[in-house]
Image (spheres, grey):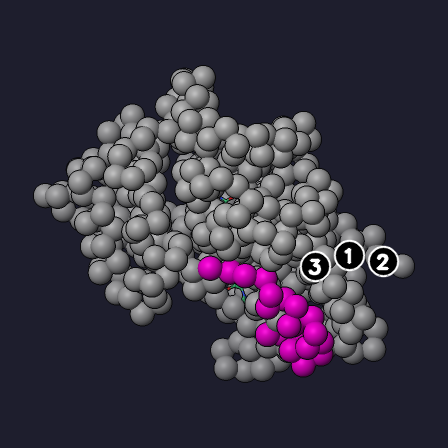
């Protein structure tokens, strides 16, 4: 069976990983010259640094299984030594080894009504980790009951501002008034996890995976190949793609879209406009990321990050790693960031902006920049849709009717984390393989 995977981000790489366990041959199409998509890496001085996909949860079982099969790279503990600016006051939220103290602080920040509402949902996840994804049974039922309101309406104000917003802004690029209770399970599962990062980064891991597939014809990676059309062709699916200004076509038994919802929508416009319209209902929000290396350490070891409130475009600034206190990762997301920063903003200006906000709290002034990398993703983080599971059911129905043989995975299926992308890809591959006559 010949299978094409469109998109060489984490969802496409995960799909290729699961497919290569079966007796199929896979063509992986990626429009860029590098794999990784939003979890891509860039070289800064002599090392690769990661944009998306830096923080790897201890509960990332599928991703860790992938990493293990690619030479078992080392992870380094990152921890959660962070502070939060609340009404101009610095509140240290998480201190390693002070769990009870942190719990009390969280309860104080959240307010009793918030704790009462959130507790059953957290318990549902802790009792069964598989529920902590988008469209799980538990959260789908919740969405049918509650998604007529937003998270901002569902929860009390201190809980929304102090606890929920730092989570939605980071994981969805969205304000609590742009997110729905039924989708919050995928965020909560991440919030109750603890994090590490790959010492050698995502770039090494992805390359190790690709070079580990040595069987001839098993996996072809087609970088710089942009798919421009998907057409039904009797019992196969024909892909049209552009490579170095040439248009070519190829037919496949099955095709997996591992694209963000809006990219897939553009490809489906002609064949199934209804599916395209429904896919566009899934919301994505912009995010800017700057990784800046300074001459001297910026953070003290015991306070390595700061979360900012909705008055600033900077949502957080943190040390790149436990041993990288001289490298700052600035993240710009949320409504204020959308007003102040766009894809036309000059990186130096954006970084200057981040430095101005961070300087009162950390060692930035008189600490010269030595290097930086910057990316702006106009559709960076997925915030899903209200009653998301029902929307996905309709999308799938239209796709299977008009383009049988095409299946979709991506960050809008099970959630936007690397682990959720692996889970969605594994389910998608099971469907595709199980679908064989
Ligand atoms: C700033 C940021 C920080 C994040 N941090 C974390 C984190 O710490 N931990 C975590 O778990 N998750 C994190 N995430 C989430 C995670 O990185 C993303 O959810 C994940 O990378 C999405 O992968 P994807 O493959 O679904 O989509 P993408 O990465 O968008 O991949 C899609 C790929 O398809 C390609 N493509 C598009 N159109 C075509 C076409 N027509 N033909 C061929 N190829 C095409 C694109 O070039 C791209 O490479 C972060 C995300 C962002 C943006």
Kindly identify which residue carries mark 3: 392
Check the picture and name the quadrant holding the N terminus. Answer: bottom right
Query: Which label was assigned to residue 432?
Result: 1
Q: Which residue is mark 2?
A: 436
> Are the residues flagged by discs 2 and 1 in contact, CB closer than 8 Å?
yes
Q: Is residue 333 visible?
A: yes
- C-alpha distance separating marks 2 and 1: 7 Å
Q: Residues within 10 Å of mark 1 (few under 14, many from 20)?
A: some
Q: Residue at x 71, y 65 (%)?
A: 395
Please provide the residue range marked out in magenta.
Answer: 266-285
Q: Secondary structure at mark 3?
A: helix
Verify CB contact (< 8 Å) between mark 1 and mark 3. no
Indicate the quadrant where residue 186 lies.
top right
Mark 2 element type:
loop
Q: Is residue 177 left or right of residue 134?
A: left
Mark 3 residue crowding within 10 angstroms, few (<14) / some (14–19) / many (20+): some
Residue 388: percent from left, percent from top? 66, 55
């Amino acid at each position: 069976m010949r299978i094409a995977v469109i998109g060489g981000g984490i969802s496409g790489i995960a799909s290729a990983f699961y497919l290569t366990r079966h007796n199929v041959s896979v063509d992986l199409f990626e429009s860029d010259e590098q794999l990784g998509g939003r979890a891509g890496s860039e070289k800064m001085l002599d090392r690769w640094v990661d944009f998306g996909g830096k923080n790897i949860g201890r509960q990332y079982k599928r991703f860790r299984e992938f990493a293990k099969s690619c030479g078992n790279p080392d992870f380094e503990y990152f921890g959660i030594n962070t502070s939060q600016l609340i009404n101009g006051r610095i509140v240290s939220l998480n201190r390693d080894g002070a769990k009870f103290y942190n719990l009390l602080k969280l309860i104080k920040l959240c307010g009793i009504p918030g704790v009462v509402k959130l507790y059953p949902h957290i318990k549902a996840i802790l009792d069964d980790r598989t529920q902590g994804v988008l469209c799980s049974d538990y959260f789908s039922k919740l969405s049918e009951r509650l998604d007529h309101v937003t998270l901002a309406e569902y929860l009390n104000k201190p809980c929304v501002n102090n606890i929920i917003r730092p989570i939605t802004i980071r994981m969805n690029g969205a304000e609590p008034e742009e997110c729905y209770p039924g989708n919050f399970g995928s965020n909560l599962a991440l919030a109750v996890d603890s994090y590490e990062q790959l010492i050698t980064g995502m770039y090494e891991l992805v390359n190790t995976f690709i070079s580990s597939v040595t069987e001839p014809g098993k996996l072809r990676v087609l970088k710089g190949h942009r798919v421009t059309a998907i057409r039904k062709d009797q019992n196969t699916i024909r892909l049209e793609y552009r490579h170095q200004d040439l248009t070519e076509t190829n037919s496949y038994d099955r095709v997996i879209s591992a694209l963000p919802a809006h990219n897939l929508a553009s490809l489906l416009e002609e064949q199934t406009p209804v599916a395209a319209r429904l896919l566009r209902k899934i919301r994505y929000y912009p995010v800017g990321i700057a990784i800046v290396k300074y001459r001297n350490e910026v953070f003290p070891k015991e306070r390595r990050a700061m979360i900012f409130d909705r008055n600033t475009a900077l949502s957080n600034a943190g040390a790149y790693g436990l041993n990288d206190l001289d490298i700052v990762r600035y993240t710009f997301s949320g409504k204020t960031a959308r007003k102040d920063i766009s894809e036309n903003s000059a990186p130096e200006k954006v970084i200057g902006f981040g430095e101005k906000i961070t300087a009162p709290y950390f060692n930035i002034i008189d600490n010269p920049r030595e290097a930086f990398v910057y990316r702006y993703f106009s559709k960076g983080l997925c915030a899903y849709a209200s009653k998301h599971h029902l929307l996905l059911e309709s999308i799938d129905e239209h796709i299977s009717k008009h383009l049988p043989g095409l299946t979709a995975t991506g960050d809008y299926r099970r959630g936007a984390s690397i682990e959720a992308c692996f889970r969605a890809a594994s389910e998608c591959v099971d469907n595709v393989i199980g679908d064989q006559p």
